[in-house]
Amino acid sequence: MINIYEVNETNNMIQHENLDVRTITMGISLLDCACSDLAQVKDRIYQKITTTAKDLVSTGEAIERDFGIPIVNKRISVTPIALVGQAACQGPEDFVSIAGVLDQAAKEVGVNFIGGYSALVSKGMTRADEHLIRSIPQALAQTERVCSSVNVGSTKTGLNMDGVKLMGQMVKETAEATRERDSLGCAKLVIFCNAPDDNPFMAGAFHGVTEADAVIHVGVSGPGVVKVALEKARGENFEVLCETIKKTAFKITRVGQLVAQEASRRLKVPFGIIDLSLAPTPAVGDSVAEILEEIGLERVGAPGTTAALAMLNDQVKKGGVMASSYVGGLSGAFIPVSEDQGMIDAVNVHALTLEKLEAMTCVCSVGLDMIAIPGDTSASTIAGIIADEAAIGMVNQKTTAVRLIPVIGKGVGETAEFGGLLGYAPVMPVNPFSCEKFVSRGGRIPAPIHSFKN
């Protein structure tokens, strides 16, 4: 039973501590849209999305009104388009035309983003995979709501270094194609290792082939709630600190569980998972960096940062799994730079570097996220950074990802403006030494020894 104290407590979290449901994401399978006729594929995709998701936004808004819980985004994820378009698309330009249809469908139903312009190439690339990947720069430049992701490795298969090298080039080309908007296209492109197929968070969401025909996922957030809770535990030992985080994560996740069950019931679509990640925004008081500083760091990036983040991530998961039967996605804590004012401030005072962020990704939910780098950074250097991050995921059996933004025409110390939820970011320095010969070897880095479990 929920008592009046808990109702008032949740209401206070919403009004004063930035608690929100970050997204309701409807996953939609497009496998039944595949055929050899491109026009027919596009028509089927448009009809499937606009029919299945026609009530998604209105239902989300109704739940907001009925329960008083802010739901920031309504989104759609679809089957990786490299699979759907395999038989019909003869080149990158055909995939770009499908991206246009996705964008139109997303606009028609009113969602913020649609994810799934994706390819899964952890072990090798089909012809269709390569065509889709090479189409990404133009697809993201010509659409507003489409998000793209590519999975280049896994613990089971190793790292596809041909895919890594190609993605280094595509990030650079995407930056060039959207240079008039501070290379904004790169903010909608994620390169994964061990990508989950039930991820509601953009830009990396896609609807996995193991999922049902349609499903509802919910991503909850609440860094501000955790920060306020920890303020009440100042001076306490780590045991008290951990208990405080766990209890707070439980409460946050229960809100998400309520929304997910209600959305599932109203839309008559199965409930998938709750992703209980602490996802920051540029809003004051909604920062993961500020949580780490409340734990005891003068600035995020100081010695102890990785340990503090590891503890936070683990306690969020421990509290959340008690609140929902189905926890999945990425779950834990995100550390994007542009979307977190505390991270931005730490970069500006030189407390936080790219290398320290990489170390932090060993223990957080995702990876190097929303980081602006100089526009003249080479494609091979970007590929090397992708390889480093993917290797962390591969060896540690966790999801890692890279969302780098080489801001064309800007250098270290300048600022890139992305707007809205994506925020702004100071351009960070990158190690100037070359890895060209390394990423050009080609082939595959084998799976680690501990991947052999069968």
Image: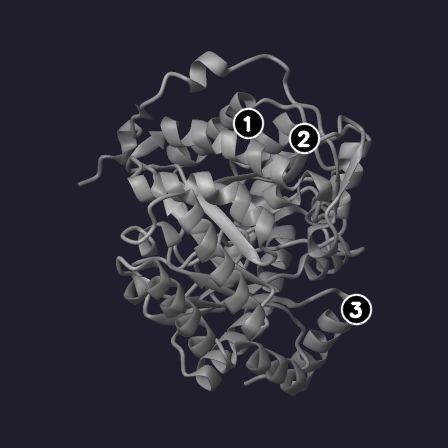
Q: Which class describes the residues within 10 Å of circle 3: few (<14), some (14-19), or many (20+)?
A: few
> Which residue, given by chain and number where applicable, does mark 2 sit on?
373
Amino acid type at mark 3: His
What residue sits 62% from the left and 26% below the top?
355
Work out whether residue 179 or residue 245 is closer to the camera in this orientation and state it: 179
Helix, strand, or loop for circle 2? strand
What residue sits 31% from the left and 37% below the top?
125
Residues at circles 2 and 1 in contact by the CB criterion of under 8 Å: yes
Circle on res. 49: none
> Which residue, given by chain and number where applicable, does mark 1 sit on?
382
Q: Does 422 sit above or below residue 6?
A: above
Amino acid type at mark 2: Ile
Q: Does 448 sit above or below residue 363?
A: above
Helix, strand, or loop for circle 3? helix
> Which residue, given by chain and number where applicable, does mark 3 sit on?
16
Distance between mark 2 and mark 3 Cα atoms: 34 Å
Question: Which dot, 2 or 3, sits closer to the camera?
Answer: 2
